[in-house]
Image (cartoon, grey):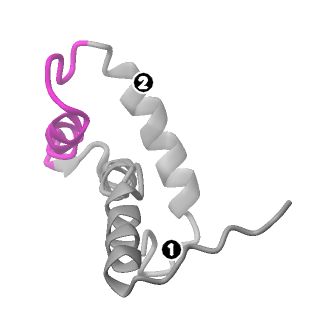
Amino acid sequence: MLNPKGDGNYADDVDAEFTRYKALGDDVGKGLSAVEVWSVISKIKLVGNLLIKKLSEVALLVLVIPHSNAGEERVFSQVKKISGRPTIVPKH
């Protein structure tokens, strides 16, 4: 998913882009959400080329991963209530 073309230098490119990202400073995207910051960073160009393309792709993929499973837990809880089956708690 991160390296669809099988680029053997992908990890090295991401590492180099991380160095460029650190050089941008702390003011880039100040006051924006993490997704907005990476959206802005992903569009920065140097001599017509995207400066931090691959690292931005990685960051944006990571940011869309849900940070909790609370929604799924609610669904299971509702299913248990609807089915009327008792919850079996394993003994430790």
Label 1 or label 2, whichever lies nearer to me, is 2
Tell me what residue is drawn at x 43 percent, y 69 percent. Answer: 2
Q: Residue furthest right?
A: 92
**Quadrant the C terminus occupies:** bottom right
First along the sequence among labels 1 and 2: 1
Separation of marks 1 and 2 at Cα, in angstroms: 24 Å
The amino acid type found where label 1 is placed reads Asp
Question: Image quadrant of residue 65?
Answer: bottom left
Q: Which residue is mark 1?
A: 7
Task: Give the residue type that dot 2 points to.
Answer: Lys
Residue 5 x %, y %: 43, 81
Who is closer to the viewer here, 31 or 38?
A: 31
Compared to residue 74, the image places residue 51 above or below, namely above
Query: Left of 40 or right of it: where is 22?
Result: right
Given contact means CB atoms under 8 Å apart, are the residues at marks 1 and 2 in contact?
A: no
Can residue 50 be found in the magenta stretch?
no
At mark 1, the secondary structure is loop
Between 67 and 73, the one nearer to me in the picture = 73
Q: State the image coordinates of residue 24 (x, y, percent, origin top left).
A: 31, 21
Q: What span is in magenta?
A: 27-48
x 40%, y 82%: residue: 84
